[in-house]
Image: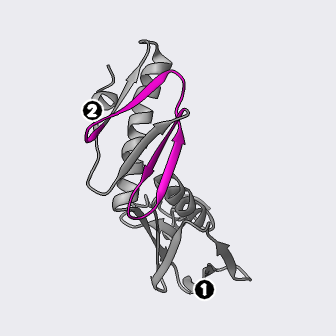
């Protein structure tokens, strides 16, 4: 048995989970999410918890078992508390500014970069060097944060670029002066 797949997903108060037509729909205070279920996995709601079972013990079905349990748990967490990723801009002149629903970034290029997020994602720029991406869908929050980071990933020599909060950038030594023996 999958260790993750075996655990039941607890349904908190105010969250409604429905399983019908091969899909799981989770509704809560922050919104509604749904995911289609693979035919090799069975999802059932028993009381205040969701149980995920598989039909056989093949490798693919074992991985699907844990995957769908984690997806359902993430949907329940998303509709109750939501998810967020924080990004930091490191570099002289690098700044982020929110104009309406559009994020405008100055990242050392000759032009400003304009980034439009999907409707279900909320982007905030509390300071000029910090960006917060939040929403109810964990995958979409991570994807949007990764797209923003990819606009100027951190470089290893000075550490300039966009990085996740708390991310460690491994530094490389730059060029050194010529050795005394070489001419």
* Dot 2: element: loop
Q: Residues within 10 Å of mark 1 (few under 14, many from 20)?
A: few
On the image, which quarter does residue 68 sit in? top left
Q: Position of residue 106 (x, y in %)?
A: 62, 82
Q: Nearer the viewer, residue 149 or 179?
A: 149
Q: How far apart are the two marked residues, 2 and 1, measured between alpha carbons?
A: 42 Å
Q: Which mark is residue 174?
A: none
Q: Which residue in the structure is indicated by mark 2?
A: 7
Q: Magenta region's main secondary structure?
A: strand
* Dot 1: element: loop
Q: Which residues lie in the magenta part? A: 22-49
On the image, which quarter does residue 95 sit in? bottom right
Colour setting:
one colour
| Residue 6 counted in the magenta span | no
Q: Which residue in the structure is indicated by mark 1?
A: 100
Q: Residues within 10 Å of mark 2 (few under 14, many from 20)?
A: some
Q: Going 68% across and 77% down the picture, which residue do you hit?
A: 114
Q: Quadrant of the C terminus?
A: bottom right
């Amino acid at each position: 048995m999958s260790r993750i797949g075996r655990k039941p997903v607890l349904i908190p108060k105010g969250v409604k989970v429905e399983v019908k037509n091969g899909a799981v729909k989770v509704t809560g205070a922050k919104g509604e999410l749904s995911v289609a279920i693979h035919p090799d996995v069975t999802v059932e709601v028993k009381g205040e918890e969701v149980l995920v079972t598989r039909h056989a013990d093949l490798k693919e079905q074992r991985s699907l078992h844990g995957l769908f349990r984690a997806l359902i748990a993430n949907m329940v967490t998303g509709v109750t508390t939501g998810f967020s990723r924080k990004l930091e801009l490191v570099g002289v002149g690098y700044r982020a500014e929110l104009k309406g629903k559009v994020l405008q970034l100055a990242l050392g290029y000759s032009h400003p970069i304009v980034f439009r997020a999907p409707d279900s994602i909320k982007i905030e720029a509390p300071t000029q060097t910090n960006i917060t991406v939040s929403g109810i869908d964990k995958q979409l929050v991570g994807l949007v944060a990764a797209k923003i980071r990819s606009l100027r990933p951190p470089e290893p020599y000075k550490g300039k670029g966009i990085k996740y909060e708390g991310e460690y950038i491994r530094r490389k030594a730059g060029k050194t002066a010529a050795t005394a023996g070489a001419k």
